[in-house]
Image (spheres, helix red, strand yellow):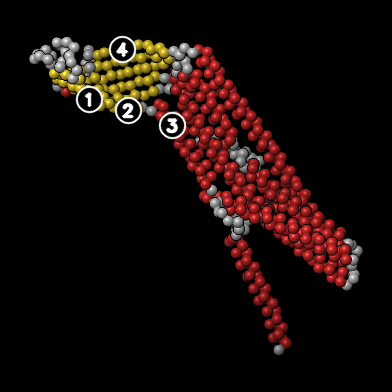
Amino acid sequence: MKSTDSLIAPMKKLSKIIVILISASMANQDAAADSLSLDTYLGEVETSHSGVRAAIESSHGAKLRAQEAELLYSPTATATVQYYDDQRIPTSAFSPRSTRQSSVSLGLSKLTSFGLQSKLSYSVSHTQLEAQSPGSISLPDYYDASPTLEFSMSLWRNGLGRETQATERLLRSGAIASYYGENFKAKLLRLEAEITYYRLALAREVVTIQRDSLKRAQALKDWSQKRARLQLADRSDMLQAEAAVQIRELELTSAGDEEKRSSRAFNSLRGNDTEAVTDRVARPSPESILKLDAKVRTGVREDLLAAEQVQVATAASAQVSREKNKPSLDLYATVGLSGRDASTSEAFSKSADINQRAATVGIKLSAPLYFETQSEVRAGYAQDAHAATLLYERKRFEQEQDWKNGAIALDEAKTRMKLTANLVELQSQKLSHEKDRHRRGRSTTYQVLLFEQDYSSAQLSHAQAQTEVLRSLAQLKTFTGDKQP
């Protein structure tokens, strides 16, 4: 019987251990299931935050709009359909009593990058003339077919296509600047979300630290009250312990308020208008945090690329305005063939006859006369272009300084994290030793409270140092980008 009992007892203990292990495993699985990773949270923000979605859509739209510059050189088709009816009184005996004409013209024109405008067209018309007397008009009903080639070239304003090319740069750079700017706006919103994630993790850890501190203060208060009732300690020790509990409760309340604010900000970024966050958020382990590094830059940050494109667009705008206010001197030429006959087919056939040609060559000048005003306007645009260059140079300098400061801040935060980790361990040992001395009557309640406060402060400093490292890493991750939209 004893041997049976000796076997049952270990089996019961083993079964209890198994139940405990299974319960712990299930608890861990539940906690993991409720855990919300940073990547998942950022995905929710990108999906639910209208500002992020708007920035992403705007950047995509700007990328498509950058192609608008190519439309300057796109071939353009033209078509004209016209009907003409003239019933006015004839000016002479040989003039027709009435004239009716219907015409159709089709054409294709194109502008080149060096400023040449060319147009090829073909027109067909049908004319009907009503004579005042029979036989006064030899061909009262006929068709005209006429192919025409036209050229126009700017010699002064837009010479060699300077205005056209500047307009192209203005359209393209403006769209690309918007593309980079919206991309950077979305990146800053993601940075805000990442910092908010770590802020909530820190707030919850601070609540845990303050709650543990309150428990220790409560235990010390209970112990002091018991000793005071037994008249083994002075009543001032008990009052001091009670005051410490009140202080810890106040600190815990403040930590809880910060957790609520962090939770609201956390939910707001993912489009949720509630205060409670049921998901579990957590920072990486201290060992993993110390191994993280973001000191490798890839590409150029989007805000600098946007500033560069703004500089290009401003210079192009100045060029367009300078060309616009210059005198216009255009060389133009027109060559056309013509075929006329009472038959449509014969009119088309005759339109290919080189002997039935007409050519025009000319120069056209147009010049504004407010010379002083033009000079001032050109000077104003030149100053705008120079100002944009200065702003870009300053932006580039500031970005380099921000990168260096961020890298220094990361190193400093890691150093503080290591120091505070050692400090937490030291303060824990110091507090434990002082509590032991207090139980043996060799220390005071005030001394224990001081050491307990030192330990809590060390824990808070260590938690804040970890968050500072993660925040610095997140900010350094914004120093990436690409060179082409």
Q: Do the CB atoms of the residues marked 2 and 4 lie less than 8 Å apart?
A: no
Q: Which residue is disc 4 drawn over?
A: 360
Q: What SS does tag 4 mark?
A: strand
Q: Amino acid at mark 1?
A: Tyr
Q: Position of residue 122 (x, y in %)?
A: 26, 22
Cα separation, mark 4 vs mark 1, equals 26 Å
Disc 3 secondary structure class: helix
Q: CA distance from mark 2 to mark 1?
A: 21 Å
Residue 379's disc is: none
Badge 2 or badge 3: first in the primary sequence: 3
Would you say the residues marked 4 and 1 are in contact, meaning their CB atoms lie under 8 Å apart?
A: no
Residue 464 coordinates in the image, percent (x, y): 72, 50
Q: Return the residue at label 1.
A: 83
Disc 3: which residue: 68
Q: Position of residue 373 (x, y in %)?
A: 52, 15
Q: State the CA–CA distance, disc 2 to disc 3.
A: 18 Å
Q: Residues within 10 Å of mark 1 (few under 14, many from 20)?
A: few
